Amino acid sequence: MANLLKNHLARAGAFILAILALIATLAPWLAPYDPLAVNLPEALFPPSSVHWLGTDPLGRDVLSRLIYGTRISLVIGFIAVGVAVVIGSAIGVIAGFFGGWLDSLLMRLVDTMLSFPSIFLLLAIIAIVEPSIYTIMIVIGMTSWMGVARLVRAEVLSLKEREFVLAAKGLGASSSRIILKHLLPNAIGPVWVAATLGVGSAILTESILSYLGLGVQPPTPSWGNILNEGRIALGLAWWLTLIPGVCILVTVLSFNLLGEGLREWMHRPHN
Amino acid sequence: MVTYLIRRLIGLIPALAWITVISFAIIHLAPGKPTDAAGAFNPKASLEARQRLEKLYGLDRPIPVQYLDWLGRTLRLDFGRSFLDDRPVIEKIQERLPITLLINSVALILMLGLCIPLGVFAAVRPDSLWDRCTTVWVFLGYSIPSFWLALLCMAYFGVHLHWLPISGLYSLDHDWMGPIARMMDIAHHIILPIGVIVFVGLAGLSRYVRSSMVEVLQKDYIRTARAKGLSERRVLFHHGLRNALLSIITILGLSLPDLITGSVIMETVFSIPGMGRLFYDAVMARDYSVIMALVTIGAILTLFGNLLADIAYAYTDPRIRVGTALTEC
């Protein structure tokens, strides 16, 4: 029963994410207004039949900004995780395959990266590079690859003793061929769960950075910086605070449900 | 135990070395110099004055020398001066630390006090209504943007109901209050931030207690305790909970750095002048000496928190030190 329920939840998560992906793709056709069009006489209008979700302090249509914000959040989430998976797999496979001093050096690096309070590390790097959509994708990826590295390393350690890898080695395959053809494709399984959960937390991180003014820079809309603009009008314009937060919550929740479902599915006995 | 301790301490050295190298590298990758504001951007500053400034901050020497110099001073807790107002960094930290310590230790005590009953109730009756509610809460706690929850609480309890102040730590007339009124004033200001921190943190913690309790309750010695006719109460609290609580020690160790570094997000949203806010302001002002000091302190505290947790764990659970000693032979 509990299993079934969780599966339903995972399915619900996947369904919501599919809708969000559709919204992100079709943003130019779905948005009723130009998300950047400033219209000061209509500033801070509450939701109405003209502006379904009201307007912000510059009179821009909130619904249109949220729709374009979906695009930004999803793209940043996926690319940041992509960066993390690439760095993490590379470091994990090198540490696991070559072992020895290289392994301990790289794993100490992983421990160290994990010991920095994550928000400190993020903000410290952002203080150096100019915050923009592209830099924060890379910075979020660069500070969240450690889990993937540990997973891949553990997989590689057990894989490299298996017959098919030993056979490849016996046939004289080069290290790079063994890594690329035999180890990586087989080690990537458990990374899927971590990556799914990772997209959720990358989106959460992006919203925090954008809220702090260190992420997506205005006028480009993102759920986080709409919340930042809403803070000025807190108590005056509830729609600016309530709705973007619900978008973040629902999106991150969907990724978490899907990730947990995926984890359960992978741990089933016959899998 | 002593050998275990010594081995763990030696094990920290490479990680400490990495921490200092990474902290130092981050700052030196930065484009521009901290002296730019007073030097290059100031049309009145002559080349000579700029060089004098760079010499003052030691920026004219080779990078490895600067690193060793910085390392030596850091070991003596000398973090240099803030580029912003030229005050010693350590002084700024001392000013902010009590506030962060107060808020986070109250929050931690509340979380620890609440997570045990919440987790145990969920573990004793798996799949009950209570267990399901906490499961939903856990998913919410992991998915909710904490700054958004804080904003909602500010809007509702502060702006709408006028129950609580929405930001800062002191009322405008704080300085004219008596000592008791002052304390009440601060307490009033920290209710919301503490509430949000506890709500979000408690979700994961109670889940943690639940899973370790569920695990313990499946052990043979619990079956033995039940079989010899002990009351369910005694089985749960004397035999079950005591063993499940071992895992709480790990959490305590891992929370140590949060006590000191504070929450950048909460302190920024609520405008609380603590360590998190100090870091945020330093990032906004590119005040590198403060950034470097806080990043280094945060990382070192995390390492020692982990170490402390492991030591406490080994101390309370002899299987661990004996286990490691055996595998070594």
Image (tube, coloured by chain):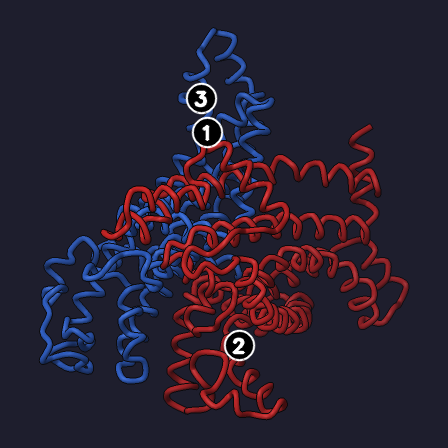
Chain colours: A blue, B red
Decide which of B59, B145 is in the foreground and name it. B59
Secondary structure type for disc 1? helix
Q: Nearer the viewer, mark 1 or mark 3?
A: 3
Q: Is residue A125 above or below residue B232?
A: above
A77 is higher (above) or lower (below) than B328: below
Q: Secondary structure at mark 3?
A: helix
Marker disc for residue A186: 1
Disc number for residue B2: none
Q: Does residue A128 show up?
A: yes
Residue found at x 59% / y 37%: B17
| Chain of the residue where label 2 is placed in the rendered structure | B
| Res B195 label | 2
Distance Cα–Cα, label 2 vs label 3: 49 Å
Amino acid on which disc 3 is placed:
Ile
Q: Earlier in the sequence, mark 1 or mark 3?
A: 3
Q: Chain of mark 3?
A: A
* Outermost residue toward the right in this view: B228
Amino acid type for the residue under numbered disc 2: Gly
A245 sits left or right of A166 in the view: left
